[in-house]
Image (cartoon, rainbow, N blue to C red):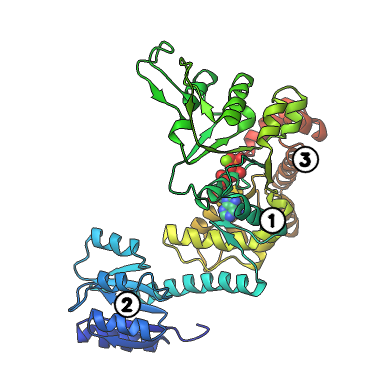
Amino acid sequence: MSRRYRVLVADDEEGIRFSLKLHLEDAGYAVEGVADGEAAVQALRDKDFDFCLCDLRMPRLDGLGVLRAVTGEGLRTRILFMSAHADAGTALQAIELGAVDYLAKPFETGEVLFRLQRAAEQLALSQRVGQLQQALGEQVSYAGIIARSEPMQRVFRLIGKVADYKTTVLLTGPSGTGKELVAKALHYNSVRKGRPFIAVNCGAIPENLLESELFGHVRGAFTDATRSRRGLFEEADKGTLFLDEIGELPLALQVKLLRVLQEEEIRRVGESRPTGVDVRVIAATVRNLPEEVKAGRFREDLFYRLNVLPIALPSLAERPGDIPLLVEHFVERFNRRLGTAIAGVTPAAMKHLMHHGWPGNVRELENAIERAVVMCEGPRVDVGDLPPQVVAGSDRVRMALASDELSIKKTTRLIEEELIRRALTQTGGNRTRAAELLEISHRALLYKIKDYAIEL
Ligand SMILES: Nc1ncnc2c1ncn2[C@@H]1O[C@H](COP(=O)(O)OP(=O)(O)OP(=O)(O)O)[C@@H](O)[C@H]1O
Ligand SMILES: [Mg+2]
């Protein structure tokens, strides 16, 4: 413990106060005790406690009352509840109100110490992120988007500037770079935030259904239309419609969308009378739309109409400076979600995380950290906990060569797998071109990809 954490024990049973004080002080905590809820609230307001072990049933004010009284006051004290009358409902309510943990009485001192230590590690982690943020004098988080790199700081500034306008925003960038997150940030930071945010994946809905999905239909408009239905544009009225994968929108619908954007009114399928709508449209795509326009797959007029306010999200490989911050953020998030207390990653593991190419961008990093937190058995995530595609194959080859391994078969397999991975990365997953580079047949490559369980 770098400094003595201060703990408030709130319990009406003197025996419990006494025994917790004894054991916690023995373990290096500074401890004070109070015997009822109102005294607890007073103590929490007056003194800067790190943790409060709070009984649920107490005279004058119960535990939930204490929590309600101090939430919203910006107290940084983390509250752990204790109760002999543990029922799942109350425990859940306490956690929802902001308690960090829940202990069922009777408990053993070891258990209390363990839970307190876990809470302390989480506290240290979030303080580190806070310090980092302050030291750099920059905003490293905006509406749940974590980033400190210059291109992302620019994105933060843009979101702040354009959120309130109705102007169409076009989000571009490779898969997993946070386009949907930015779309939500735009909505929830705008005057429209009390109205719906509706997302639709234009690539996932069959072409013949998409028009009625977007604009609605009237009864009898087509065979299955037994009733009239509102479309997503109407559902999103006064709110935001997020048209994801806009590059997949069929040409016929591109014409109709352009008209809707220009006239701010829609026509349900089977109806000639238009209905006015007030919708802010945000579109996103992984495709290069100017190229799609050149190839005749995307209408030029719609492209210009959407591209009024383009926001391009850089790939993670272009902003490695964001990696450590994202790693801490995800470790903390999965600790909370999985009830673990991993205290970050080792420097060796961080080196691998920094050097990986992250073709799946932030989404791949998020998944890698979730897996690592689950796998991890030590206090920190180490190299062995990382997914194999992150621990570059070349390291595994080097490790094998440096070991006592003499099997030509095993070592050759490692080298072969590494070469295949590199070829696939170089060709962006194009197997025909990868097979050419590897000088093997296309069929042999497919077989080996399966054999080595290489995910594309
Ligand atoms: N800067 C970030 N900070 C925190 N989480 C992020 C960040 N960027 C992305 N994520 C997370 O990564 C995942 C992928 O993000 P998102 O779905 O927004 O990507 P996308 O660009 O829409 O990808 P796709 O094109 O594949 O749909 C989500 O779980 C999101 O929360
Ligand atoms: Mg998306």
Coordinates of residue 52 in the picture (x, y in percent)? 35, 78
Does label 1 or label 2 sit earlier along the sequence? 2
Q: Is mark 3 within 8 Å of ligand 1?
A: no
Q: Is residue 445 visible?
A: yes
Q: What amino acid does circle 2 point to?
A: Leu
Residue under the image location 47 percent in, 62 percent down: 335
The residue singled out by tag 2 in the image is 53
Q: What amino acid does circle 3 point to?
A: Gln
Left or right: 14, with 350 as reference point = left
Residue 284 image-quadrant placement: top right
Secondary element type, mark 3: helix
Name the image quarter holding the C terminus.
Answer: top right
Secondary element type, mark 1: helix
- When the figure is inspected, residue 11 is found, relative to residue 304, above or below; the finding is below
Residue under the image location 78 percent in, 30 percent down: 433
The residue singled out by tag 3 in the image is 426
Coordinates of residue 319 in the picture (x, y in percent)? 71, 55
Number of numbered markers: 3
- How far is disc 1 from disc 2 in space, using C-alphas? 43 Å
Dot 2, crowdedness within 10 Å: few (<14), some or many (≥20)?
many
The residue singled out by tag 1 in the image is 154
Q: What amino acid does circle 1 point to?
A: Arg
Coordinates of residue 80 in the picture (x, y in percent)? 34, 72
Whether tag 1 and tag 3 are in contact, CB under 8 A, the answer is: no
- How far is disc 2 from disc 3 in space, using C-alphas? 55 Å
